[in-house]
Amino acid sequence: MNFALLDPDSPLPRSWWLEQAPSVERVELEIGAGSCGFLLEAARRNPSTLYAGFEIRSGLVKAFETTGNRPPNALLYGLDGRWVTSCMLAPESIDIFHVYFPDPWWKKRHHKRRLFTGDFCRGVSRSLNVGGELRLVTDVRIMYESALDGLLEAGLKQRPGGSRSAIPGGKAGEPYCSAYEAKYRRQGRELHEAVFISAGAG
Ligand SMILES: C[S@@+](CC[C@H](N)C(=O)[O-])C[C@H]1O[C@@H](n2cnc3c(N)ncnc32)[C@H](O)[C@@H]1O
């Protein structure tokens, strides 16, 4: 654990992230990285980008820590990504947020745990660089709609057409995506996909 991440009086500047791995020039965060299928593959393919994930399930964090041949630009923190985004990120410090299959928390008493709160959306908007993006894929319509409401309200714009330009696929050949996305695409499940862009209004 890096304890700088736990001090809300000192929001983390971009330079702090760039010190966390050798020779990185860009900073991308994944909230709810799960088994880190996307995070690890993205880091392997893009060695000049730091991929920092947040994951609240400690078993998944332990599994990540014991993964062999982890690229040095892939990091996973056992922290609540909603809290980190709301409280810990300096303005205009992040290039891309990835959010793939956020937990729907179906039970009414658990709705307060859902990701796209006003604080989270304002944190995303504030901390993205101008032209930065939040990329979302979900199979749950209500999660898509709450992201849409919250992120537009926080000042982001939705990219027309909706889909990601750089993934899955990229320049390096075979498509890559998160474990849930791979599974649901195989099953032919309907997915909702959106890219939100910062115009610097956060
Ligand atoms: C449905 S899984 C998707 C995992 C991965 N993104 C994928 O697509 O394969 C959602 C993950 O988000 C994690 N999670 C839920 N709320 C979180 C939060 N506030 N901060 C960090 N992780 C969270 C869960 O523990 C779970 O591993």
Image (tube, grey):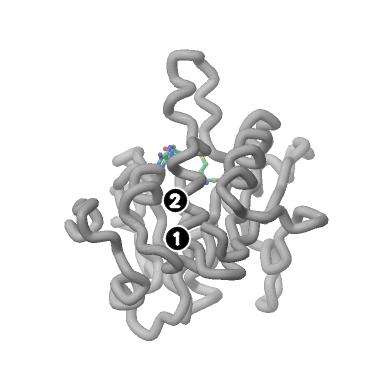
Q: CA separation, marks 1 and 2?
A: 6 Å
As drawn, 196 above or below 116: below
Residue 64, quarter of picture: bottom left
As drawn, 108 above or below 138: above
At label 2, the amino acid type is Gly
Q: What mark, if any, has residue 123 been given in the picture?
A: 2
Q: Residue at x 48, y 22 (%)?
A: 111
Q: Residue at x 41, y 80 (%)?
A: 24
Horizontal and vertical percent position of residue 40: 47, 63
Q: Nearer the viewer, residue 134 or 198?
A: 198
Which residue in the rendered view is the most extreme toward the bottom?
23
Residue topped by disc 1: 127
Q: Residue at x 52, y 55 (%)?
A: 125
Q: Residues within 10 Å of mark 2 (few under 14, many from 20)?
A: many
Instruction: Tell me the element at label 2.
Output: helix
Residue 73, quarter of picture: bottom left
